[in-house]
């Protein structure tokens, strides 16, 4: 026996974030971006056993169809998940959405996707994590995989990249230069990275714009975790035209291990530099620098299966994890 709760009051939202049987959720997360609706499912003892947020305002479209998003998803088991996912689909359909997509916490700048093939490698820093049964909650309730993603591992940073010299020569011929992030001007550097990211990703699946202030607020808390040598910016006549963002795998330290792995989270170049080899150069230079700093491995994180970065990654790395984003057709 379950009780549906429309979480609108502050006390409800506190329970939404802190249910004993669900992963904790930061209250700040509920504001980035603010959802149109929040729902929970409580068991007969009053414990929260499932939750989700819904977005139908200002969401991206897909092939001309309006999209509703299901995010902040968590469920103790498939039965609770089924009740909530079907309710979410009904609400999104009533709001005029033709497609329900999830899990996605409001937009693709926030956490989204589920691990569907975990592999043998432990979780890495900034990687989404979920119980193994959650993908089944979606599949068993009318959802299908909308997009697939992978993470890959380069196990040996001591291995020199034979293409590096050629890539350096090509960059020099184009008067391109590469420098590390300037830690003393971190916020200004984030503004430069924001300009590149928003231009480079605007044609990505379910892309939504993000305000510069929101982007900076999201990434500023990572400053203590960053090694500036691993965040590289490419410049053309002093103007930033591309970047690579890598960060040490701090989860290794939480497991009592030495940190010997970096996580390459993002590679982006302005559209006019696509195909120039700049992305490959940034990846090669970043991995070379990491090796010189004593790191032994690099994880290439969360790449869309059709993304150019996956082609770059395949030169060094093998797949260690697969993820999926799900969608369900809705009846109006």
Image (cartoon, rainbow, N blue to C red):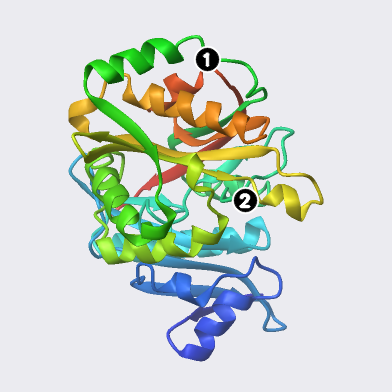
Q: Which mark is residue 161?
A: 1
Quarter of the picture holding the C terminus: bottom left
Quarter of the picture holding the N terminus: bottom right
269 versus 23 height, above or below:
above
Q: Earlier in the sequence, mark 1 or mark 2?
A: 2
Instruction: Kindly tell me whether residue 306 is visible in this rendering.
Output: no
> In front here: 261 or 34?
261
Instruction: From the top left corner, tell me how far across and down residue 31 is, in percent.
Output: 39, 73
Compared across the picture, whether 120 is left or right of 130 comes to right
Residue at image coords 47%, 81%: 7
Secondary element at tag 2: loop
Compared across the picture, whether 99 is left or right of 298 comes to left
244 versus 9 height, above or below:
above
> In front here: 150 or 277?
277
Instruction: From the top left corner, tell me how far across and down residue 285 is, in percent.
Output: 46, 27
Marks 1 and 2 sit apart, C-alpha to C-alpha, by 32 Å
Depth check, mark 1 against mark 2: the one in front is 1
Q: Which mark is residue 88?
A: none
123 versus 282 height, above or below:
below
Question: How many residues crowd mark 2 within 10 Å: few (<14), some (14–19), many (20+)?
Answer: some
> In front here: 55 or 45?
55
Compared across the picture, whether 138 is left or right of 231 comes to right
Instruction: From the top left corner, tell me how far across and down residue 105 is, in percent.
Output: 43, 60
Residue at image coords 51%, 18%: 314
Quarter occupied by residue 9: bottom left
Secondary element at tag 1: loop
Answer yes or no: do the residues labelled 1 and 2 have beta carbons within 8 Å? no
Instruction: Kindly tell me whether residue 223 is visible in this rendering.
Output: yes
Question: How many residues crowd mark 1 within 10 Å: few (<14), some (14–19), many (20+)?
Answer: some
Instruction: From the top left corner, tell me how far across and down residue 224 is, in percent.
Output: 55, 60
Residue at image coords 56%, 40%: 263
Which residue corresponds to mark 2?
A: 129
């Amino acid at each position: 026996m379950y009780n549906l709760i429309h979480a609108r009051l502050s006390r409800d939202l506190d329970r939404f974030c802190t249910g004993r049987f669900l992963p904790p959720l930061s209250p700040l997360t509920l504001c980035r971006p603010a959802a149109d609706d929040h729902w929970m499912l409580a068991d007969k003892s009053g414990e929260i056993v499932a939750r989700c947020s819904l977005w139908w305002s200002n969401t991206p479209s897909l092939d001309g169809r309006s999209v509703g998003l299901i995010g902040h998803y968590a469920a103790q088991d498939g039965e609770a998940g089924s009740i909530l996912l079907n309710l979410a689909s009904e609400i999104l359909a009533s709001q005029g959405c033709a497609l329900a997509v999830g899990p996605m916490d409001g937009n693709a700048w926030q956490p989204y996707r589920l691990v569907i093939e975990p592999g043998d490698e432990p979780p890495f820093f900034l990687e989404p994590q979920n119980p193994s049964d959650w993908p089944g909650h979606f599949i068993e309730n009318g959802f299908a995989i909308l997009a697939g993603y992978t993470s890959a591992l380069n196990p040996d940073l001591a291995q020199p990249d034979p293409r590096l010299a050629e890539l350096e020569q090509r960059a020099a011929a184009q008067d391109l230069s590469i420098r590390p992030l300037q830690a003393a001007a971190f916020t200004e550097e984030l503004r430069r990275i924001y300009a590149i990211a928003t231009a480079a990703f605007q044609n990505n699946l379910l892309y939504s714009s993000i305000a510069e202030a929101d982007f900076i607020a999201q990434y500023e808390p990572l400053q203590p975790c960053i090694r500036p040598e691993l965040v590289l910016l490419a410049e053309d006549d002093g103007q930033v035209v591309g970047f690579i963002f890598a960060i040490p795998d701090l989860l290794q330290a939480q497991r009592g291990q030495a940190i010997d792995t970096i996580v390459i989270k993002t590679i982006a170049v302005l559209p006019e530099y696509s195909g120039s080899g700049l992305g490959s150069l940034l990846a090669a230079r970043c991995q070379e620098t990491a090796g010189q700093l004593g790191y032994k491995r690099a994880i290439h994180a969360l790449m869309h299966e059709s993304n150019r970065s996956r082609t770059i990654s395949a030169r060094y790395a093998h797949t260690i994890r697969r993820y999926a984003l799900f969608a369900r057709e809705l009846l109006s």
